[in-house]
């Protein structure tokens, strides 16, 4: 007996949207979400994997480089959150843009908006909160993958932390007064912390494969610093640890942007 199919016509077939329809849908979603403020420090810098995760959620990126004259907003009312990324400079440098960015972090702190500082950005957050930022006492650096240990508070915020994460720094910071330690390390004890909706990560979950190639090529001299990993270890360790770090970052970004300012929660309860 031959196989008989049900009648198929235009009314019974559910078609995938064409490219134009998919683009229109994505644009509509993006317009309904506030952009995320992105602060970068070099002409060639990109928001890397963090930017990819934000775009995947439908957020536009408002990229600014105060080092090259861009201004920072007086309020974050027009943004879903803000991220200050890393750079080769120090939070202790006297440059005007460094002082400007540290002072500006008072805005997300005051408005209880989602803020994330990565490496230099975390050091700026720590300094804004009154903590000391300084080189390692023995001159050691962390350049490559190193182990971290999430605290109970860190696991409550976001479970499934990677046990190794990517670093590129030779300065660290104290835990600011009133802040909560989320993850700790060895040479640099404070790896991640938060105060209200503001988070600081000493490590680099933003690094893509292309960025790793660029950093280890242009910054090859830093691979000779005490404690730094040889270039080939960066890529070998990435093959082992990157899947976990990528999954954890997505989970963190989802929860970070969902954090509602306490003032909004108070208004909703009235």
Image (cartoon, helix red, strand yellow):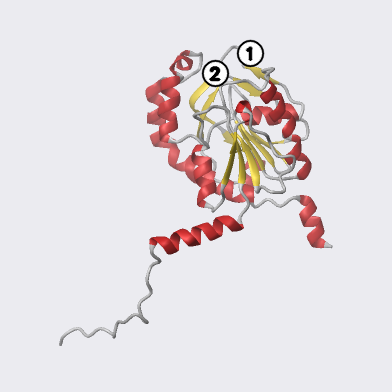
Which residue occupies the foreground of this view, 123 or 69?
69
The quarter of the picture where residue 198 lies is top right
Residue at the (54%, 60%) spot, across then down = 28
Query: Does the image show residue 110?
Result: yes
The percent position of residue 41, horizontal first and vertical second, equals 58, 28
Q: Residue furthest top?
A: 138
Checking the image for residue 137, the label placed there is 1
Query: Does the image show residue 175?
Result: no
The percent position of residue 163, horizontal first and vertical second, equals 51, 36
The percent position of residue 257, horizontal first and vertical second, equals 63, 49
The percent position of residue 240, horizontal first and vertical second, equals 40, 36
Give the number of callouts.
2
Q: Secondary structure at mark 2?
A: loop
For this view, does 18 lie left or right of residue 201?
A: left
Cα distance between the residues tagged 1 and 2: 10 Å
Checking the image for residue 51, the label placed there is none
Mark 2 crowdedness (10 Å alpha carbons): few <14, some 14-19, many ≥20:
many
Specify the quadrant that holds the C terminus. Answer: bottom right
Residue at the (56%, 32%) spot, across then down = 148
Q: Is residue 16 above or below residue 137?
A: below
Contact flag, marks 1 and 2 (Cβ < 8 Å): no
For this view, does 110 lie left or right of residue 87?
A: right
Specify the quadrant that holds the N terminus. Answer: bottom left
Q: Residue furthest front?
A: 69
Q: Residue furthest bottom?
A: 1
The quarter of the picture where residue 202 lies is top right
Residue at the (64%, 52%) spot, across then down = 258
Q: Secondary structure at mark 1?
A: loop
Q: Which residue is mark 2?
A: 141
Which residue occupies the foreground of this view, 66 or 115?
66
Which residue occupies the foreground of this view, 115 or 174?
115
For this view, does 115 lie left or right of residue 11?
A: right
């Amino acid at each position: 007996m031959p196989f008989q199919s049900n009648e198929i016509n235009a009314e019974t077939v559910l078609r995938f949207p064409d490219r134009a329809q998919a683009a229109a849908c994505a644009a509509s979603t993006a317009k309904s979400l506030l952009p995320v403020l992105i602060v970068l420090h070099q002409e060639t810098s990109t928001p890397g994997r963090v930017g990819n995760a934000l775009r995947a959620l439908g957020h536009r990126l408002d990229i600014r480089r105060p080092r090259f004259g861009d201004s920072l907003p007086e309020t974050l009312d027009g943004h879903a959150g803000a991220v200050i990324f890393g750079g080769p400079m120090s939070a202790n440098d006297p440059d005007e843009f460094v002082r400007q960015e540290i002072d500006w972090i008072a805005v997300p702190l005051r408005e209880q908006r989602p803020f994330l500082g990565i490496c230099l950005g975390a050091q700026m957050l720590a300094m804004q909160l009154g903590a000391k930022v300084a080189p390692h006492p023995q001159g050691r650096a962390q350049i490559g993958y190193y182990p971290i240990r999430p605290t109970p508070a860190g696991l409550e915020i976001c479970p499934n932390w990677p046990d190794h994460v990517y670093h590129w720094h030779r300065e660290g910071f104290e835990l600011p007064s009133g802040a909560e330690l989320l993850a700790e390390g060895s040479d640099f004890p404070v790896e991640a912390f938060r105060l209200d909706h503001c988070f600081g990560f000493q490590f680099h979950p933003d690094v893509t494969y292309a960025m790793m190639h660029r950093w280890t090529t242009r910054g090859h001299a830093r691979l000779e610093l005490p404690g730094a990993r040889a270039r080939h270890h960066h890529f070998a360790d990435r093959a082992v640890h990157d899947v976990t770090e990528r999954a954890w970052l997505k989970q963190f970004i989802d929860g970070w942007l969902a954090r509602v300012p306490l003032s909004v929660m108070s208004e909703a309860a009235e």
